[in-house]
Image (spheres, rainbow, N blue to C red):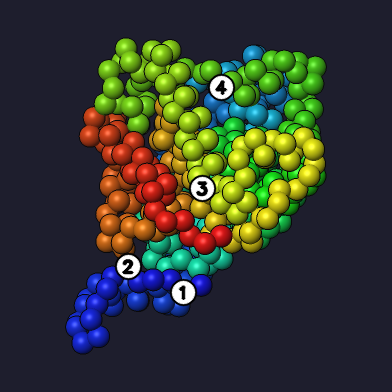
């Protein structure tokens, strides 16, 4: 697929921006080369930048309780509160517990998370090569201070969640549906944020693989979740209500996205219902105007197809960029409408913002500017009225452009 240059220039006119664009899109800016440059930089961060304790000790306290025989999620409590993540998180941090001498070897943990960061970066670079976007988009990611901080200096479980979510996206782009479903379920078992991909994924599955395989993948997703819940089967209700608590109320002190709202609005149940309504509405709009583009099927036709097991008629070929754009859009809708975002949640979506801005037909200078503004807004601590407005504005603008632009040919 030929990519249009975002900068137009006459044949005899010297344009430095065009030269920069061509260099940043050349083979010299290959993700593998950038990744090798990242290795010494990551090592430098570990050796020179102080580690910040936030949740690691609490994770280890909860795992210590789990290893002592406790299986009731309400009783798995650390210094920051009760355990609120699914069983995949527990098994993952149990492994880290033993690898880091019961959580006491922080430096070793940082090296493990640095490896996870590099793996995530590699997978994202692979995805960007798969969809044939200009490689300067990948270069924007390695400049992210917040991403390095989340992975290497904070040791959040969002790091592993992000890696498996990226593996899910890569597998989906390769049309390895069973593998992508397994990766999505694993990511959701670490942190339920990955469920944000599910609406678009089901629409794509139905159009690409048909209703029978879609049902198989739904049951596969559920089976993986059941496997992770098995250690807690004696307190199964406690597990499901704690690990997948959709009604949790967040603290205004830590919000990144709604700081510009007064506290009474932030804590209002009405505000919670409003963002839920906006979330559902945007999902429906994108489902009927974008994600169904290959089949032109209505929601009713999709439901009928799933119930009767009859494939949708006249489904056009589905391109890789259509798959990636649809899935990342579904995720970004959830980010925009999140009840509250904390700083570590940046890892849920930041990897794909440059790609989405490109798909929204922003020019290279505009893409760089918007990525810079987003990075700024997520590095302001505590968040301010201005930073939180930027945090909401950029996803909203991106989604608006993705909805109103001419769709790329699937």
On residue 2, the disc is 1
Q: Quadrant of residue 212?
A: top right
Please name the residue that numbered disc 2 is placed on.
Answer: 6
Mark 3 or 4 closer to N-term?
4
Q: How far apart are the two marked residues, 3 and 1, measured between alpha carbons?
A: 22 Å
Q: What element carries label 2?
A: loop
Q: Residue at x 31, y 61 (%)?
A: 363
Which of label 2 and label 3 is nearer to you? 3
Q: Quadrant of residue 366?
A: bottom left
Mark 1 or 4 closer to N-term?
1
Q: In which quarter of the image is residue 229?
A: top right
Q: Is residue 295 visible?
A: yes
Q: Where is residue 346 in the image (x, y as percent from the top left)?
A: 43, 41
Mark 2 or 3 closer to N-term?
2
Q: Is residue 316 above or below residue 346?
A: below
Q: Residue 18 vs residue 238: left or right?
A: left
Q: Position of residue 251 (x, y in %)?
A: 40, 19
Please name the residue that numbered disc 4 is placed on.
Answer: 246
Which of label 3 and label 1 is nearer to you? 3
User: Which of 288 and 114 lies nearest the eye of the viewer?
Assistant: 288
Please name the residue that numbered disc 3 is placed on.
Answer: 290
Q: Position of residue 51 (x, y in %)?
A: 42, 40
């Amino acid at each position: 697929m030929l990519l249009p240059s975002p900068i137009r220039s006459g044949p005899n006119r010297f344009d430095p921006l065009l030269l920069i664009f061509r260099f940043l899109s050349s083979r010299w800016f290959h993700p593998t080369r950038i990744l090798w440059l990242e290795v010494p930089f990551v090592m430098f961060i570990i050796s020179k930048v102080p580690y910040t304790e936030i949740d690691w000790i609490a994770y280890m306290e909860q795992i210590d309780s789990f290893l002592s025989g406790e299986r009731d999620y309400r009783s798995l409590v650390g210094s920051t509160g009760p355990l609120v993540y699914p069983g995949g998180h527990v098994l993952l941090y149990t492994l880290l517990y033993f690898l880091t001498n019961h959580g006491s070897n922080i430096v070793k943990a940082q090296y493990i998370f640095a490896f996870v960061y590099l793996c995530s970066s590699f997978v994202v670079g692979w995805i960007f090569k798969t969809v044939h976007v200009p490689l300067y988009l990948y270069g924007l990611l390695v400049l992210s201070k917040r991403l390095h901080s989340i992975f290497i200096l904070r040791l959040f479980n969002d790091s592993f969640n992000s890696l498996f979510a990226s593996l899910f996206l890569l597998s989906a782009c390769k049309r390895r549906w069973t593998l992508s479903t397994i990766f999505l379920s694993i990511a959701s078992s670490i942190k339920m944020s990955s469920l944000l991909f599910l609406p678009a994924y089901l629409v794509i599955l139905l159009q690409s693989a048909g209703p029978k395989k879609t049902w198989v993948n739904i049951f596969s997703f559920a089976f993986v979740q059941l496997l992770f819940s098995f250690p807690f089967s004696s307190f199964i209700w406690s597990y499901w209500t704690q690990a997948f608590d959709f009604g949790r109320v967040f603290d205004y002190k830590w919000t990144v996205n709604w700081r510009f709202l007064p506290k009474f609005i932030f804590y209002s149940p009405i505000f919670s219902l409003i963002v839920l309504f906006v979330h559902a509405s945007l999902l429906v709009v994108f489902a009927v105007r974008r994600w169904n583009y290959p089949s032109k099927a209505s929601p009713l036709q999709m439901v009928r197809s799933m119930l009767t097991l009859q494939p949708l008629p006249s489904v056009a070929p589905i391109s890789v960029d259509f798959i990636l754009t649809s899935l990342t859009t579904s995720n970004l809708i959830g980010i925009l409408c999140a009840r509250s975002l904390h700083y570590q949640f940046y890892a849920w979506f930041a990897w794909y913002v440059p790609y989405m801005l490109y798909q929204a037909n922003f020019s290279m200078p505009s893409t760089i500017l918007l990525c810079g503004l987003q990075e700024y807004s997520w590095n302001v601590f505590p968040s301010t009225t201005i930073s939180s407005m930027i945090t909401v504005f950029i996803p909203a603008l991106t989604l608006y452009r993705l909805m109103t632009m001419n769709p790329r040919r699937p």
